[in-house]
Amino acid sequence: MSLKVYNSLTNKIEEFKTIKEKEVTMYVCGPTVYNYIHIGNARPVIFFDVFRRYLEFLGYKVTYASNITDVDDKIIAQAIKEHVSEKEIASKYAEAFFNDVKALNSKQCDFTPHATDYIPQMITFIQGLIDCGYAYEADGDVYFRVTKLNDYGVLSNQNTEQLESGARIKVNDKKENPLDFTLWKKTTEGIMWDSPFGKGRPGWHTECVCMIDDLFKGMIDVHGGGFDLKFPHHENEIAQSEALHHHKIANYYMHVGRVDLDGEKMSKSKGNVINIPFLQEKGLLEAYRFLICFSHYRVQVNFSLDLLEQFKRDLDKIKRSFKQASLELDLADVSSNEVVESDINSFISYMNDDFNTPNVLTLLLQITKDINVLLRSKDNTNLVLKVNTLKTIFDVFGLKLEYQKMNQETKQIYFDWNEARINKDFAKADLLRDKLVEKGVL
Ligand SMILES: [Zn+2]
């Protein structure tokens, strides 16, 4: 029962084999910090966090890097709009992004490289590509010479002719071929750096290649991001790396599906976006994480508040049973760290099958039903195992379940409340219930 993942590079589900035994290196392309992220941008932040947690659960040591793109035309434009420097724009939105990551309960990455800290490495890298004929200068810009590379299009599984006819490429007389992409961009306004090619800034595709190489000094196991990064971003990263380092950066490329809003693509320019603080204020952020966790990661999600409510109902159902069981167990002073092995084995087999999380949700709902049955039959011995199992699985998804602990006085009230309910003394039960609510138990 080994882990299998869909590799976008081969378009196949493959056995997950790491470069170093029981160690995983991964790099996920992070945001360009010119604005707040929307809930669609948050999907890779959630998925790759779960991926990391699951690998750790399996006993891997994971090194996870995700960058901040803090130089881009959009940042320059936003800086002009807000009358501040690019640095201020980038740090304002990077901070907002980190707050969102925290609010989503995704763990911090081990490395969050900022593109502007790697400019000298990028210049050296671009010079290297020019020196071996894979790049050329044209009026202060530097372009990658796509036709020199034999297997350009390996990730998008298309040859250069297909890509040329399919891609929406702006006419640019400076390029030898319309598919050639920018490594260095000559700029006359906003932030810029001196280089042997003239004043300008690096191209986005070059940033990640250089940061990955600088951090990991060679190939990594997993390169990930949103599905829209497959072409051109990751394709162009591979092209540069093949040209200079003779490898494809990573053995596995993993791409996460898009999140649409009410049937339409979310777009900051169109304004049909939902951001993280909006869901947070409505108390729906955990439900959103739950929705993303249990929608298959490669499938497009058509988000609506109705869909979120559906997932929230399942989440609430699970939480309610866990809480009640946890209180019962505390009352009976039953504790154990054991889990139900057959449930954990089912969980692992679904996860190992390219993250079949919809099946995991079905399993979680079954465990919840089991808990309810055990609560009714007062079978605390088995109840504690089921509760531990539920919590173990929730932890892997970064979803919180906390064991409820009561002091002696509260335990007595809780006990009396149960008694009153059994005896159908509703007036007394209501009174005791209010006390428990006041104490934050219910
Ligand atoms: Zn990238």
Image: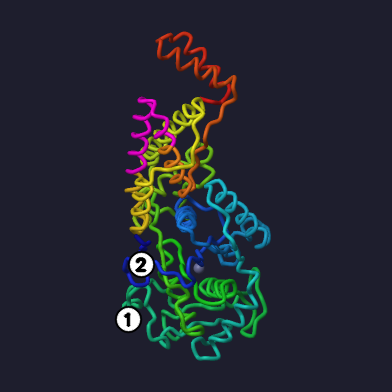
Three-letter amino acid code at the position of disc 1: Glu
Outermost residue to the bottom: 132
Q: Is residue 359 magenta?
A: no
Residue 26: x and y in percent read: 50, 66
The front one of 398 and 190 is 398
Three-letter amino acid code at the position of disc 2: Glu
State the separation of the CA atoms marked 1 and 2.
Answer: 32 Å
The mark total stands at: 2
- Quarter where residue 179 is shown: bottom left
Residue 34: x and y in percent read: 57, 58
Left or right position of 323 against 192: left
Figure quadrant of the N terminus: bottom left
Which residue matches tag 1?
Answer: 161
Work out whether residue 186 can be spotted: yes
- Quarter where residue 353 is shown: bottom left
Residue 137: x and y in percent read: 55, 86
Which residue matches tag 2?
Answer: 15
318 vs 127: above or below: above
Which labelled disc corresponds to residue 88? none
The front one of 131 and 104 is 104
Q: Which residues are magenta?
A: 362-384
Q: Nearer the viewer, mark 1 or mark 2?
A: 2
Q: What residue lies at 54% left-to-right and 21% top-to-bottom? A: 411
| Overall secondary structure of the magenta section | helix
Secondary structure type for disc 1? helix
